[in-house]
Structure formats: structure tokens, C-alpha cells
Image (cartoon, rainbow, N blue to C red):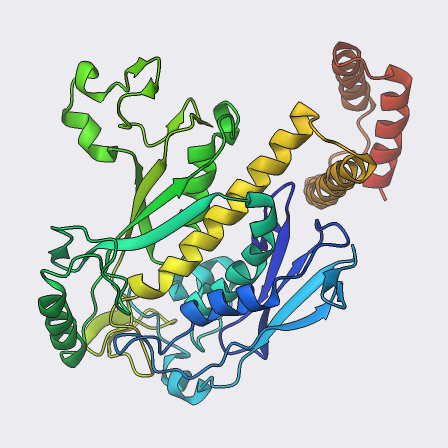
Amino acid sequence: MKSNSFGKYFGITAFGESHGPAIGVVIEDVRSGIRFPLEEIQKALNERKPGKNKFSSTRQEDDKLQVLSGVFEGKTTGMPICLVIYNNDARSKDYTHLKDIFRPSHADFSYFNKFKIYDYRGSGRASGRETISRVAASGLANDILGNVEISAYPVQIGKFSITKFDENFTNNLHWKDSTNFTKLTEYLAKIQQSGNSVGGIVEVKIKNLPIGLGDPVFEKLDANLAKAILSIGSVKGIEFGDGFQLAKMTGSEANDQMDKTGFRSNHSGGILGGISNGNEIIFRFVVKPTPSINISQKTVTKSGEETIFKAKGRHDTCIVLRILPVAKAMVKLVLVDAICHQKLISGENFNIVDYREALDKIDEDILIALARRKKISEKVKEFKQKNKIDIEDKNRENELISTLKEKANLWKINTEFIKNIWQLILENSKK
């Protein structure tokens, strides 16, 4: 399933479930001889793990990173890097009462209807625990990012918002307002005691990013950042710059005017036309309340019967606090992918290793496309057999090859080469 892979030029593939033996990630696009930042990755994992504050899950996992391959004597070997974190404190028995129940606002219902099976023990791949792999993989992006700075912090938790921003105010909630911090903790304590949960809004800032990252139309930097952030469980919305406030502005108010020193404002959040413009990139995203709450709710069983459900187990009062390192990780993965692509198209400081890595990635994409094509061809064959339609359609095959040869000529690719390739592909599809 390619949906568990991320990135085109700095690609990762994640695996593992919340109550399975382990969570892990495989990274294949890392050149040899790079220092492996084990301590930095472990520090980021420690920020993400449960138990960092009294409002997070009480699940006790040490999240100790283990390197299974691709690293020797502290440096990358150029081989696939496999990182794994074993699960040691999963209490699957806490979830046995859920095996026939769809929990409200969890992935249970949609997973079951798509796959006809779902892992009720802590949500399986839908669990927030899968984000360990993202954080682990992002540690290898630091050398490529250089002096790029990424910060993430909550600007709203439940009904409390930042009113007086103080960068120097430190606490285990990462809250940047000393004027209402005490009231916030009291509020969260009451929510926790009542068995309920709250969501919030996180702000992310990216400094020192070069101009020109991102590409037009479908590969816009803000579009890729949005996809990355929305891929995190419980995230339900995102805005860049002034975001939804732009709706009530006029053009003269919303435009980022320029003078000889640069932009005079940053309403667009540092991205114009999908490409970084040198301004600080700023965006905010909303996190819904943790759906597992110790309050009775209505739901249905697999058989469609109505029932009353109350969550058991260990859950976060506010998941916002543990999403912060995950958000930073996803930003890193998007940026490093954009930087690698920009280096490819600009040709700056390229060597034979860079070219080989680029070709390897393209070859992998071709294989994936061929595998998908074969699966669809098999479905077409089954449909034709069922409906007594001839398997072979020479007219369609000739039309296809003719069209492909026209496109090949347009893109200055040898037309006979393309013809030979597609004849092999078509013959293989009939087997």
C-alpha cells in the first residue's frame, strides 16, 4: 500500500501498529558517509512519547530507537536504513470490549468498511503512535536543511488562546502566555477529571528558508505542507498567513506590497504561487479533541445494533501537546523533499551520486506504476471474461501505441523504443 510511503526525493516507508510488536520506518534515499544523528532523533522521540505532562496518556513506553540496518560506525552506508521502536507497554486487554463496536469519531467504522477488518487494539495504523516513524525519519533531514529553523507551539487549547505572546516563557505544555497559564492548567485538570477532552490550534513558523522552493500547480509548497499536516491524525484544518481572515479583507489590505528592501507585510505566509518568497513561512492548523473519552456515547456495533459506549484505557486529555514534534517532523520531510527537487532541476553542485539517486527514484516510480497497471489489467481481464468479451482488442492496442508514439515524438523520445516497451507491457497484461 503506497499510502504508507511519503516523499519523492527523500522517500520513507512507515510500518507497524499501536499494539503490534513495533513501529518503524525504512529510508532508502540517503547517501553514504553521512553522520547518523542518533541522539538528536532520540531527543525528538522523547518529546513525542506519552507521559511528558500530566494531561497526556499514561502509557509508559521508553520509545528507544534501534537501528537495524544502513548505519555502520555512526555513519550511513548508502544501504536502506531501517529504524524500529518496539512496543513494550501495550495493554491489548483494555480494548477487548471494542472488537464488535465502532467508537465515535475514530477510524474504526471507515477502516472496517474499506478493508472488512480493523485492529481494535488502540486503532492499529490509525493510532497516533504510528507518528513515531515520522519523527524518527525526519532526524536525517537536519543536515540538508542547514540553518532552517522550525518552531511549533499551541496558540489555542480548548477555550484558552494566547493573548500575550512570550517567547521566553517555558513550561511542559509549550504555552507562550504566562498571564493565563495557571488558569489553563486548572481548566485542563477539570476536563481530565470529567473524563472529557479538548482540541486546539497549533502555529508553525519556518525561518531562513531559501526563495524558490515549491513548484507550480500540483506541487505547490503550501499544498504539500497542507497534505503533510493533514496526514497527522486528529488534524482537521489548516490556514497559511492570515488564512481565513483574508476573506474579510480588501485586496489593498491583503496584498503583500514590496519596496527595495523586500516585502512590507506577510499576509500570504511566505508562499506566493506555491513557491517560497523568502518571507517567514507561517501557518496554523486545528486539532480536534481526542475522541477517546470516559463519557457515555451512542454508537453502533458491526451488526448495526445501537449501543452505549464508554472508552477505557489510557488517553490524552489534549493531543495537541504531543502533535508538536510530529508537525515539525512532517515540515522537515516536506522541505527536504523540496530542497532535493530544487537541486535536481537547478543542477547546482550536482555530482554522479546525485544523478544516480534521481534516476533510482524515477525507476522506482516506474515500477510502482507498472504494478498498478498490472492490477487494473487483471480486473479488466476478469470483467471481460465475466461478460464474455474478447480479451484481445487489437484496434485499441494499435490506437494506444499510436498515441504514445505521438507523445514520445513530442517529448523527443525514440518512438520505436516506446513502441517496443508498450508491446511488452501489453503482452504481459494478457498473461
For this view, does 299 lie left or right of residue 231? left
- Identified at 53% across, 69% down, the residue is 42
- Identified at 25% across, 57% down, the residue is 168
Residue 58's spot in the image, x, y percent? 34, 82
Q: Quadrant of residue 404?
A: top right
Compared with residue 9, is residue 79 higher up or lower down, i.e. above or below?
below
For this view, does 176 lie left or right of residue 151? left
Assign the C terminus to one quadrant of the image: top right
Q: Is residue 314 visible?
A: yes
Residue 252's spot in the image, x, y percent? 19, 14
Outermost residue, bottom direction?
93
Q: Quadrant of residue 101?
A: bottom left
The one nearer the camera, 70 or 7, is: 70
Q: Is residue 388 visible?
A: no
Compared with residue 57, is residue 373 higher up or lower down, i.e. above or below?
above
Assign the N terminus to one quadrant of the image: bottom right
Residue 324's spot in the image, x, y percent? 37, 58
For this view, does 416 lie left or right of residue 286? right
Residue 27's spot in the image, x, y percent? 67, 56
- Identified at 35% across, 78% down, the residue is 51
The one nearer the camera, 294 or 350, is: 350
| Number of residue marks | 0
The one nearer the camera, 60 or 405, is: 60
Compared with residue 296, is residue 357 higher up or lower down, i.e. above or below?
above
